[in-house]
């Protein structure tokens, strides 16, 4: 049972990206990531030993206070949060207040632990996700740096579509596909905009919080 987790930071802000962009959210950024994306903007989170451990109870109380102050949901992010077993963490939060919606943002390289009201999967070309995560996630967000990432985005959607016979068509059609250019990457912006224009199943996501200097 994982009772303590390494934490980079916690903060109440607005979700800046993807489907829930603009909504009030409480973020818990867990430390530890071995995925190694070259464009990563949270490299300080990679080494979990550099960050203090916090108890699951303490994090749950922080979350409850943020909800009382207006947060619509909790976002567990990282790092790669699923490097940790989050069963006890999610259970503790829901025991405290079962109406708190728990979201997670993951690359999907590990198997799922914990339970969520919303799963954002950001699959990486150099370290593809588990197929089970592709099936159950609510939102796919592919980061675009080069043409190869566009091809990867297409292959991710194709893999999900191939799951149709073994999976609920309803859930598949409700999936939300986002393409998000890497921050300050002109080629990424151009490719993502062109792709979204030509592929209406996909929506452009921007890191809006960075434009307005929001955490
Ligand atoms: S998975 Fe996320 S935290 Fe890990 S290296 Fe990639 S972008 Fe950074």
Image (spheres, helix red, strand yellow):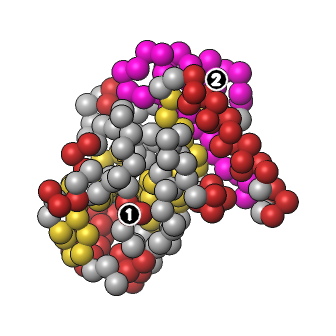
Q: Position of residue 131 (x, y in %)?
A: 63, 58
* Residues drawn in magenta: 171-200
Q: Which residue is mark 2?
A: 195
**In which image quadrant can residue 44 be found?**
top left
Occupied quadrant, residue 4: bottom left
CA distance separating discs 2 and 1? 32 Å
**Does any atom of ligand 1 lie closer than 8 Å to the CB of label 2?**
no
Q: Quadrant of the N terminus?
A: bottom left
Pick the residue in front: 112 or 35.
35
Considering only order in the chain, which callout, 1 or 2, is on the residue closer to the N terminus? 1
Q: Residue at x 32, y 31 (%)?
A: 210
Residue at 62% of width from left, 18% of height from top? 194
Is residue 155 left or right of 112 when viewed as pictured?
right
Locate the C terminus and report the quarter of the image it occupies: top left
In magenta stretch: residue 158: no
* Image position of 172 (left or right of 67): right
Mark number displayed over residue 60:
none
In the displayed structure, does residue 33 sit left or right of residue 133?
A: left
Residue for badge 1: 83
How crowded pointer 1 is (Cα within 10 Å; few <14, some 14-19, many 20+) is rated as many
Q: What residue do we see at 42% from left, 69% from top?
A: 100
């Amino acid at each position: 049972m994982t009772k303590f987790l390494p934490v980079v930071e916690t903060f109440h802000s607005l979700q800046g990206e993807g489907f829930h962009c603009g909504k009030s959210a409480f973020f818990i950024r867990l430390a530890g990531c071995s995925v190694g994306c070259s464009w990563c903007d949270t490299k300080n989170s990679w080494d979990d030993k550099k960050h203090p451990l916090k108890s699951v109870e303490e994090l749950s109380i922080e979350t409850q206070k943020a909800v009382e102050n207006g947060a619509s949901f909790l976002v567990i992010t990282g790092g790669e949060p699923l490097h940790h077993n989050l069963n006890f963490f999610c259970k503790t939060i829901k025991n405290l207040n079962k109406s708190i919606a728990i979201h997670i943002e993951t690359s999907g390289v590990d198997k799922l632990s914990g339970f969520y009201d919303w799963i954002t999967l950001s699959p990486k070309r150099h370290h593809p996700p588990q197929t089970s995560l592709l099936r159950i996630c609510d939102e796919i967000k592919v980061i675009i740096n080069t043409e190869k990432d566009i091809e990867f985005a297409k292959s991710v959607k194709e893999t999900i579509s191939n799951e149709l016979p073994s999976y609920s068509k309803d859930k598949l059609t409700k999936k939300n596909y986002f393409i998000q250019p890497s921050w300050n990457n002109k080629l990424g912006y151009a490719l993502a905009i062109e792709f979204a224009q030509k592929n209406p199943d996909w929506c452009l996501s921007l890191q809006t919080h960075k434009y307005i200097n929001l955490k």
